[in-house]
């Protein structure tokens, strides 16, 4: 209550405010056996406009849960989430989401999937095709516009999903381990492409991963989450200039540093699992 | 090209099986074990079939039956789909009437005929009622199962793209439910066809394939009994192949649910 009152004092039009603000958020869910499991607790962080933030943590630390809350797909038990100072109350095309699986609609063509996204944000019919083709071009899929999703490889599907997410001009791109299911080579290519597309569009991005190299390569800032129930325990700036390469020697110490912290959290998870 | 080839690949084994049955039938006939009056030769059934098609006997009965079937099936698709949508939309409806439908499915539709005759009289309205009640549960359950099997991920994806309420239903949930739904329609069609034949056999009177079966039995025209049965089977298979299997195959192939 006090928090809400305090927030009302902040002018909504304040230019310097964060793009996204997560304040004291907690979320628990019921397991199949009926036990209440706390996924994350007291999660608080801000994301600045145009910033690329990675949420990193051991499995089960609630990083995907946090993303679902930012997307507005789920509601927090406690705390608040704000975009440009306004509370997030539900999903919307201003926050596009990439899932671990491509989640393309199998009854539409690749082009149809992107045109559908444009239709949902009320882009006039005449403009949809050109805009969809523009985004397919950006992810090098122009030749596959007429293909059905199942005809594409895993990496191509995820690129189509990226095009669909960006086509409706979101202010924030949310990504939930989108490359985790891909083979190592494809993953590197897509990480490069995401870096390039992100740089071109200047969107804000919140990217969930359990891969330290991926986080260090992509992020301006890495937020490390603790063993479950997850909360943000480390906040690391990655001030390596872009465009980056994987073998950039300046990334190595960042990776080592974050990796050390992550290992501690993973060990905590393992200790709890075998302790019980 | 490939569609023609896959169609012929489906048809040839069926034709071979039919030929096998005819050969066995001919052999049994030639042993003289059965009176030709009750087991005529394949050749005499064939000539009866051709003759009754030519004189319009079978076509008239077939079209009369098909009209009843289409009326009954159309009503049960409409009612069953609406019922299924209600069941998914309302948990109270699901807990109350949903379980009734499962019970209804375990009752053979022909068991409704005595009651239907009391309600509608000994006429084709009673038969159509049995067709509806026979295929309705399959359509309702197909709708429910089709909707329940929609992957939550696709719904979440749709919601993040801005689809909500009716738009989510119209553009994501319903299209995603179609493969399961079409499979259920196919089953509903089979139930409708069987219910129709049973109903026509018992009610008699009005023109139809079931009626033709009954009349030719009474006249001891065994070749016509078998010829009519052949027509019933051929129509059943033809509709299944031409409409439902084709539709099902096309939908699944488009979505990459089959590899061929």
Image (tube, coloured by chain):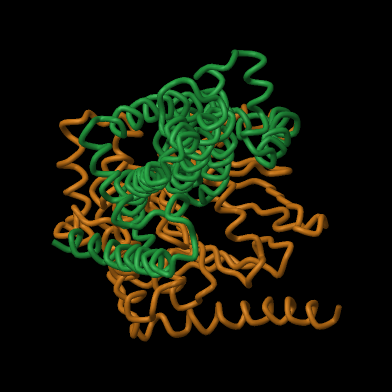
Q: Residue at x 60, y 36 (%)?
A: B137
Q: What residue is shown at x 73% (from left), y 81% (from top)?
A: A270
Coordinates of residue B139 in the picture (x, y in percent): 53, 37
Q: Residue furthest right?
A: A276
Q: Is residue A107 left or right of residue B153?
A: left
Residue B164 locus on image (x, y percent): 48, 32
State the image quarter where residue B195 is shown: top right
Q: Position of residue A269 (x, y in %)?
A: 73, 76
Task: Answer left or right for B113 relative to B34.
Answer: right
Task: Look at the image and give the colour of chain B.
Answer: green
Toward the viewer: B57 or A191?
A: B57
Residue B203 in sight? yes
At x 24%, y 40%, the residue is: B51
- Shade of chain A as shown in the rendered figure: orange
Residue A19 seen in render = no
* B233 lies left or right of A133: right
């Amino acid at each position: 209550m006090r928090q809400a009152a305090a927030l009302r004092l902040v002018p909504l039009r304040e230019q310097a405010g964060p793009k996204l603000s997560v304040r004291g958020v907690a979320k628990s869910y019921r397991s199949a056996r009926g036990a209440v499991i706390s996924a994350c607790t007291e999660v608080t962080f801000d994301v600045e406009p145009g910033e690329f933030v990675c949420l990193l943590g051991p499995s089960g630390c609630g990083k995907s849960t946090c993303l679902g809350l930012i997307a507005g797909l789920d509601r927090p038990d406690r705390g608040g989430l704000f975009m440009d100072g306004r509370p997030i109350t539900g999903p919307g095309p201003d926050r596009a989401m990439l899932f671990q699986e491509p989640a393309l609609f199998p009854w539409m063509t690749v082009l149809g999937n992107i045109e559908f996204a444009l239709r949902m944000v009320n882009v006039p019919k005449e403009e949809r095709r050109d805009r969809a083709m523009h985004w397919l071009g950006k992810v090098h899929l122009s030749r596959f516009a007429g293909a059905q999703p199942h005809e594409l490889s895993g990496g191509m599907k995820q690129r189509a999903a990226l095009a669909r997410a960006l086509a409706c001009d979101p202010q924030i791109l949310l990504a939930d381990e989108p490359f985790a299911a891909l083979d190592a080579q494809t993953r590197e290519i897509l990480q490069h492409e995401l870096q390039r597309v992100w740089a071109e569009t200047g969107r804000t991005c919140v990217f969930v991963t359990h891969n330290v190299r991926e986080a260090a390569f992509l992020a301006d800032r890495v937020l490390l989450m603790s063993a479950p129930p997850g909360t943000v325990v480390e906040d690391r700036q990655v001030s390596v200039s872009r465009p980056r390469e994987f073998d950039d020697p300046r990334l190595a110490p960042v990776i080592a540093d974050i990796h050390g912290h992550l290992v501690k959290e993973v060990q905590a998870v393992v200790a709890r699992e075998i302790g019980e | 090209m490939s569609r023609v080839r896959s169609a012929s690949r489906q048809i040839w084994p069926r034709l071979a099986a039919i030929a096998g049955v005819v050969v066995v039938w001919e052999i049994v006939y030639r042993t003289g074990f059965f009176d030709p009056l009750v087991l005529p030769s394949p050749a005499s059934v064939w000539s009866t079939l051709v003759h009754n098609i030519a004189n319009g006997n079978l076509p008239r009965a077939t079209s009369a039956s098909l009209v009843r079937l289409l009326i009954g099936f159309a009503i049960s698709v409409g009612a069953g789909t609406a019922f299924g949508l209600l069941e998914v939309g309302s948990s109270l409806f699901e807990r109350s009437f949903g379980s009734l439908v499962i019970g209804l499915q375990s009752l053979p539709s022909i068991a409704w005929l005595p009651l239907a005759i009391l309600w509608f009289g000994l006429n084709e309205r009673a038969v159509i009622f049995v067709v509806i009640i026979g295929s309705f549960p399959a359509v309702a359950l197909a709708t429910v199962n089709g909707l329940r099997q929609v992957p939550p991920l696709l719904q979440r994806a749709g919601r993040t793209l801005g689809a909500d309420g009716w738009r989510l239903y119209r553009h994501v949930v319903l299209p995603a439910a179609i493969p399961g739904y079409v499979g259920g329609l196919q089953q509903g069609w089979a139930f409708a066809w069987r219910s129709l034949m049973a109903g026509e056999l018992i009610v008699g009177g009005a023109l139809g394939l079931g009626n033709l079966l009954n009349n030719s039995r009474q006249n001891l025209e065994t070749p016509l009994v078998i010829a009519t049965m052949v027509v019933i089977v051929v129509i059943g298979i033809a509709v299944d192949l031409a409409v439902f299997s084709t539709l099902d195959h096309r939908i699944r192939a488009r979505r990459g649910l089959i590899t061929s």
